[in-house]
Amino acid sequence: MISFVRNQSRKASFFFILLAILLVLNGFAREDQEEGGCKKALKKCIDDAEKMMPNFHLFSNFLGYCMVGYVFCMKYLVN
């Protein structure tokens, strides 16, 4: 049972990391917007997440939190 949970958590972590990378690339690919508060906040959040790198699960969760905040900012606060 424990190995099943570990396997599923690894898959979920990989999925969120991949999703985070894709969201960041999609957000930075928009060249029509200047560097605003959303990108600055994302960069600061990622800098804070780097401190949690030794604990991979905490790092991946924090990175997911950064991505959700960035998407929220781009969708609701910029417009």
Image (cartoon, rainbow, N blue to C red):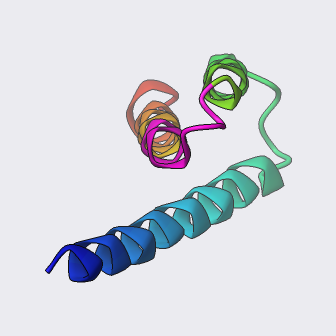
Which residue appears at 64% of the width and 19% of the height? 48
Left or right: residue 19 compared with residue 3? right
Res 65 quadrant in image? top left
Front-most of residues 49 and 22: 49
Magenta segment: does it hold 57?
yes
Res. 17 image quadrant: bottom right
Of residue 60 and residue 73, the one placed in the foreground of this image is 60
Find residue 21 and report its horizontal and vertical position in percent: 67, 60
Q: Give the magenta part as a residue range.
A: 52-62
User: Picture coordinates of residue 56 (x, y %)?
Assistant: 55, 47
Q: Magenta stretch: dominant SS?
A: helix
The residue drawn where x is 78% and y is 48% is: 28
Say which residue appears at 80% left-offset and 25% top-offset.
Answer: 35
Q: Quadrant of the N terminus?
A: bottom left
Residue 24, given in percent of the width and then of the height, sits at: 68, 51
Residue 22 falls inside the magenta stretch: no
> Is 39 placed left or right of 6 in the picture?
right
Q: Residue at x 52, y 28 (%)?
A: 78
Q: Residue 74 placed where, x, y %?
A: 52, 37
The answer to whether residue 71 is above or below residue 44 is: below
Residue 50 falls left or right of residue 5: right
Q: Is residue 70 above or below residue 18?
A: above
